[in-house]
Amino acid sequence: MTELTKLTIAEARDKLRKKEISATELTQAFVAAIDGANAHLNAFVLPTPELALKQAAESDKRLKTGDARPLEGLPLGNKDLFCTAGVRTTACSKILDDFTPTYESTVGANLWNAGAVMLGKLNCDEFAMGSSNETSAFGPVVSPWRRERGGKLTDDKLVPGGSSGGSSAAVSADLCLAATATDTGGSIRQPAALTGTVGIKPTYGRCSRWGIVAFASSLDQAGPIAKTVRDAAIMLRAMASHDHKDSTSVETPVPDYEAALGQGLKGLRVGVPKEYRVEGMSKEIEKLWQEGIAWLKAAGATIHDISLPHTKFALPAYYIVAPAEASSNLARYDGVRYGLRVPGKDLIDTYENTRAAGFGKEVRRRILIGTYVLSAGYYDAYYLKAQKVRTLIKRDFDDAWKSVDVVLTPTTPSPAFGFGEKTGDPLAMYLEDIFTVTVNMAGLPGISVPAGLSGEGTPLGLQLIGKPFDEATLFRAAQAIEDAAGRFIVPQRWWEAGSAKAEPAAAKSAAKKIDGKSKAGSKAK
C-alpha cells in the first residue's frame, strides 16, 4: 500500500486507466498514510476519509465504463484557504471557528469536476500570512526532511516553508499525489523549494480567486504543489479557468501544459539578473544558481545577463501593499455574521473582543501595519508610493522580455530552518520572500524546481520567472532543470511506525535521481 502513495500523478493516472489499480485502493493507501503520519507532521487540519472514499467509488464506476475524466480517481490535498462545500474551512485561524461554507471555490470545483478525490484540508499559516507555517491556529507543520550533521540525521524539527507548508509537507511525505496552494509573495514557491517539491504560481488572473479566503486581493493566486514538473503541468491545466464570478480572472485559453514538455530549449533566451545576488546569500545557493545556468545552457538555451534595477525596493513595497490589502480584507471578520464571537458590553466591545481572541500575533501585526499605511496623512507617503514602485518593478520585467524569454534566480536565500529560529525576528522572516515577491508585484508566473541539496542534506530550489500567461515555456525550462538535477525524495521516513534512522550513505542514495543517475550538482561542469 505504501508503494502506491509514492506514485506521481502521471504514474497513478496511467495505472488507473490500465485498471492495474482502482481509485478506491489508491485512496485507501493515502487515507492510511495520513492516519499514520499526521500526528507527527500535522500537515492535515481536517482529513476527510469518508468523502474521499465516496468520491473514489464514484471514480471507479466511471473508470469501468470508460467515462474517465482528466484527473479521475487521483487523491489530492486541499489547502484550508479554499472554501469547500459542507467541509469546514478556517484559513487556519481561530476567528473562522467552525465555519462551513455552502459553496465550493472555483479552483476546487474544477478539480473535483475533473474527477479528483479530496483527501482533506491542509494546514497553512493563518490567513496565509507567514513563511514557515508556524502561525497556524492548529499548530506548526513539521517538514518530513531532517538535517544531516556529523554524518548523522538530526532530530531537529524543520519548517516546511509557508504559507502553504501543509501542502508542501504532504506532497513531500507522500500523503497526497499533489495539493492546492496559494501564493501572495512566494507561498507556493518557497515551501516547494524547502521540501524538494515543484510549485508554480501562475500569472495573476490565470486561476480564479473566487471561494479562496482573501489575504491581499491584487497579489493572491492559486497554484499547485506537486512531485514533478509534469504533475504540476497536469494540475495547473485542471485548476485554471476563466470565471465570471471573479472580475480579475482573465478570459484566455488554458493550454495543454503537459504537451509543452519535452520540446527542448533550443533558442530559449534565459536572463540572469545581477540584482538577485544579494548580500548574505549563501555560497551553496550561488553555486546552485551557476549549476542551473549550466544545465539550461547544455539543454540548448542561451544565457544573458540582465538588470532589474528596482528589485531592491520590491520587498519593502510588498510589505506595504500586502498588509494594506489584508487590513481591508480582514475587516469583515467582526464576530457578527459568522465564525468566532466573543460578546462584549456593546457592539464595539464585541468587535474588539472577537478580533483580539480570533487573530494570531502575525495577523494582528499585519493588520496594524496595513491600517497605518492607509490612514490619513500616511496613504500618500507609504501606500501610494509603494504602488508606484510596483509599477516600476513591472516595467523592469517588461523591458527584460524584449531580450529574454525566462529569468532564472534562486528561490530562497537559505535552506529550511528550524522551529523558532526566525519567528522572534519578523524582518528575518520577511527576508525569506526576497527572491519571490517581485513575481507577485508584477503579476507574473513563477515556478520553483528542486535542484540540489544543502550541506546539511536539505532541499534547495531554483526559480524560473516567465512572461504573462506563458506558463508553458516555464514548464519546458523547468523540465530541463528536473532532467539534469533529478528528483529529491526524503531519505528517511522517520514519521512512519518502525522506521529506523537512516545511515548517511542511505540518505545520500535516497536523494539521488529516481532512475539511479548521479545526484544534482554532479552534471554541471
Image: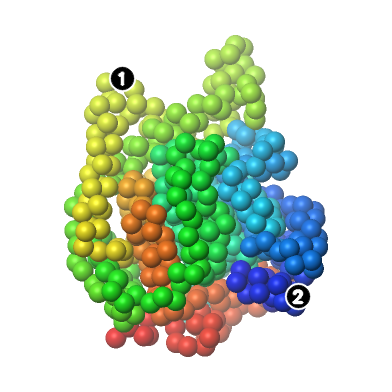
Residue at position x 61%, y 12% in the image: 345
Identify whether 341 is placed above or below 320.
Answer: above
Q: Which quadrant of the rendered structure holds the N terminus? A: bottom right
Callout 2: SS: loop
Q: Is residue 194 left or right of residue 105?
A: left
Q: Which quadrant of the rendered structure holds the C terminus? A: bottom left
Q: Is residue 427 left or right of residue 93?
A: left
Here the colouring is: rainbow
Identify the image quadrant of residue 492.
bottom right
The x and y percentages for residue 469 are 39, 54
The x and y percentages for residue 523 are 36, 85
Identify whether 11 is placed above or below 403.
Answer: below
Identify the image quadrant of residue 336.
top right
Viewer-proximal residue, 387 or 300? 300
Viewer-proximal residue, 140 or 163? 163
- The answer to whether residue 150 shows anywhere in this view is no
Residue linked to disc 2: 19
Mark 1–mark 2 contact, CB under 8 Å? no
Residue at position x 75%, y 78% in the image: 20
- Type of residue at label 1? Ala
Q: Is residue 412 left or right of residue 255?
A: left
Residue at position x 52%, y 52% in the image: 240
Q: Nearer the viewer, mark 1 or mark 2?
A: 2
Residue at position x 54%, y 21% in the image: 352
- Which label was assigned to residue 235? none
Residue linked to disc 1: 376
Q: Is residue 436 left or right of residue 87?
A: left
Callout 1: SS: loop
Q: Earlier in the sequence, mark 1 or mark 2?
A: 2
Mark 1, Cα crowd under 10 Å, few <14 / some 14-19 / many 20+, is few
The x and y percentages for residue 416 are 45, 63
- Kindly report the distance in space between the C-alpha atoms of the residues bearing marks 1 and 2: 64 Å
